[in-house]
Image: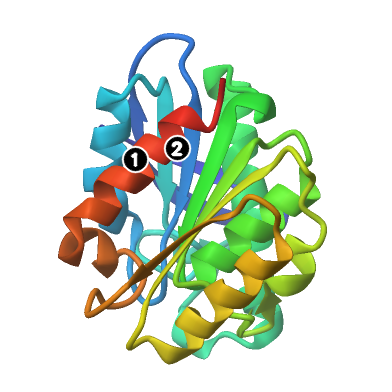
Amino acid sequence: MQGIKFATADGVTIAGNYFEGTAGGTAALLLHMMPATKESWTPLAEALGGRGFGAVLAIDQRGHGASLAQGDRRLDYKNFSDAEHRAKRLDVEAAAAWLVNERGASLARLVVAGASIGANLAIRFAADHPAVPAVAALSPGLDYRGVTSADAVARLGAGQALFLAASQEDDYSFATVRGLAAEKSGAVLKELRGAGHGTAMLVNAPDLFESLADWLRKSVT
């Protein structure tokens, strides 16, 4: 693992953990939930490396972890407005650009996975970039701090694969994944019980961890 940093279009310094794997392999971008950090993805990032991925990047979104500076301004997600949360889309854009420009990745071989608000951000990124072949969303919501999902799912192309997972006791996300799956033909839906929220499900439900890692590997041909 290598710690890296890059800047967004609006001057936020984003910190990431980069995992290099098989040369020429698929790339993955991993987006955490609140109040987690990039480290919440480390087990999956390492597993993807073992499945032939060439580049895996997990980032701290603005105001989280080590991504706390926008010039001289210190950022804290706990004080963000909805507009500032929506601006996290710039973090995702900059992360994908780093993978393309610095590691030779291509959007056509880039999969994106997110948890909670990171799931919504991942779906929206895929909708904005039709070349992205697959997106995985753990515990998405219809609207997390102004970052919406249903309108983005409606914009996904027929060839873009969607993986959805939520745990039954997580009422909001559970209802969300059912609704999103009904709107996207061919979506994979994993309904769990007692598994928690977001990346916590990868710890509490080992079968989900393996299913997600395998699905991401198989989603790019």
Label at residue 213: 1
Tag 2's secondary structure? helix
Q: Position of residue 28 (x, y in %)?
A: 48, 36
Q: Return the residue found at the far top.
A: 23
Find the distance from the CA under tag 1 to the CA under tag 2.
5 Å
The reply to whether dot 1 and dot 2 touch (C-beta < 8 Å) is: yes
The image shows residue 157, relative to residue 185, as above or below, that is above
Amino acid carrying label 1: it is: Ala
The image shows residue 94, relative to residue 148, as above or below, that is above
Residue that appears at 33% across and 46% down: 211
Q: Quadrant of residue 153?
A: bottom right
Residue that appears at 27% across and 58% down: 40
Q: Position of residue 122 (x, y in %)?
A: 59, 56
Left or right: residue 213 compared with residue 195: right
* Residue identified by numbered label 2: 216
Residue that appears at 68% across and 71% down: 149
Q: Check the picture and name the quadrant holding the N terminus.
A: top left
The image shows residue 41, relative to residue 116, as above or below, that is above
Q: Position of residue 155 (x, y in %)?
A: 82, 57
Badge 2, how many Cα within 10 Å: few under 14, some, many 20+? many
The image shows residue 15, relative to residue 142, as above or below, that is above
Tag 1's secondary structure? helix
Amino acid carrying label 2: it is: Leu
Q: Position of residue 83 (x, y in %)?
A: 71, 81
| Nearest to the observer: residue 19 or residue 180 | 180
Residue 176 in view of the camera: yes
